[in-house]
Image (cartoon, helix red, strand yellow):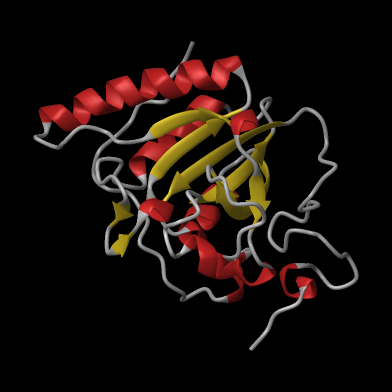
C-alpha cells in the first residue's frame, strides 16, 4: 500500500502535522528553535517529542550521512551514513533545550553504539544535532552528567555523538513514516523510560 502526503495531514490543510496542527516545513510561529535527536527507530521517538509541552512541530528524516536524498531502503543498508532522526521545533518560552535533552537521555539507551534494542545498524545510533551554542553546551553537559549516572550503575560509556546541524543535511523521510504512530497507534515502538533519571541541564 502506498501513502500520499495527505496521509500525514489534516484534510484540506496540506503539509500540516496531524497532531500538532502546524506546518511540517514551516513557517513556525516565533519564537522557535530547532534541535535534532536520533535515538533508534524514529517512529517512537517522534511520538515522544510531539507529546512534550512547548513542542511546535516534529518530523522524521535522515541526518548525518553523505548520500544525497536517501530513501529508507538505502538508509537501512547502513551504507549511507545517515541516522534515523527527528527534527524537533520548540517554543523556548514554554520549554527548553535542557528539558528536551532530559527526555532524550531518559527514553533510550545511549550506550549501545550502532543499535537500539533489537534494531541494529548505524542508522539506529544515538546522536544530537544542535543549532545554537546554548544547545551544544547543554548537550555536552548533560552527556557528561548522565554518563556518570550510568557509570555509577555499572553501565558502559555513552556513545552519543553531538554535531552541529549545519554540518550535514536533514532529509525528510517518506510520508509513510511521518507521524507513523498517529496513523498506527499500536505500531512498533521500543522507546520509553529506561530507568535512569536525567536532571534537565541548565547553563
Q: Residue furthest right?
A: 12
Q: Position of residue 8 (x, y in %)?
A: 72, 69
Figure quadrant of residue 17? bottom right
Q: Position of residue 161 (x, y in %)?
A: 40, 32
Work out whether 98 lies above or below 122: above
Figure quadrant of residue 52? top right
Q: Nearer the viewer, residue 2 or 51?
A: 2
Residue at 38% from the left image edge and 52% from the top image edge: 122
Residue at 64% from the left image edge and 45% from the top image edge: 170
Work out whether 78 lies above or below 56: below
Figure quadrant of residue 129? top right
Left or right, 63 with reference to 33: left
Residue at 57% from the left image edge and 52% from the top image edge: 62
Q: Nearer the viewer, residue 118 or 80?
A: 80
Q: Residue furthest top?
A: 203
Work out whether 44 lies above or below 143: below
Number of residue marks: 0
The N terminus, quarter of image: bottom right
Left or right, 101 with reference to 148: right
Left or right, 92 with reference to 203: right
Left or right, 8 with reference to 152: right
Q: Residue furthest left?
A: 154
Q: Position of residue 162 (x, y in %)?
A: 45, 29
Q: Nearer the viewer, residue 112 or 50?
A: 112
Q: Position of residue 25 (x, y in %)?
A: 79, 49
Residue at 41% from the left image edge and 65% from the top image edge: 189
Amino acid at each position: 500500500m502506498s501513502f500520499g502526503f495527505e496521509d500525514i495531514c489534516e484534510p484540506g490543510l496540506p503539509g500540516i502535522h496531524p497532531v500538532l496542527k502546524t506546518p511540517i516545513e514551516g513557517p513556525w510561529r516565533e519564537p522557535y528553535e530547532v534541535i535534532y535527536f536520533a535515538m533508534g527507530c524514529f517512529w517512537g521517538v517522534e511520538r515522544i517529542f510531539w507529546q512534550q509541552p512547548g513542542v511546535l512541530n516534529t518530523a522524521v528524516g535522515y541526518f548525518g550521512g553523505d548520500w544525497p536524498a536517501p530513501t529508507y531502503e538505502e538508509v537501512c543498508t547502513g551504507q549511507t551514513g545517515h541516522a534515523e532522526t527527528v527534527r524537533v521545533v520548540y517554543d523556548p518560552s514554554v520549554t527548553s533545550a535542557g528539558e528536551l535533552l532530559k527526555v532524550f537521555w531518559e527514553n533510550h539507551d545511549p550506550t549501545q553504539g550502532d543499535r537500539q534494542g533489537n534494531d541494529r545498524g548505524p542508522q539506529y545510533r544515538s546522536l544530537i544535532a544542535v543549532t545554537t551554542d546554548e544547545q551544544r553546551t547543554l548537550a555536552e553537559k548533560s552527556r557528561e552528567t548522565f554518563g556518570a549516572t550510568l557509570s555509577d550503575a555499572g553501565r558502559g560509556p555513552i556513545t552519543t555523538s553531538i554535531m552541529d546541524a549545519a554540518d550535514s543535511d536533514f532529509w525528510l523521510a517518506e510520508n509513510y513514516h511521518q507521524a507513523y504512530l498517529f496513523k498506527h497507534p499500536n505500531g512498533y515502538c521500543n522507546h520509553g523510560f529506561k530507568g535512569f533519571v536525567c536532571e534537565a541541564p541548565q547553563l
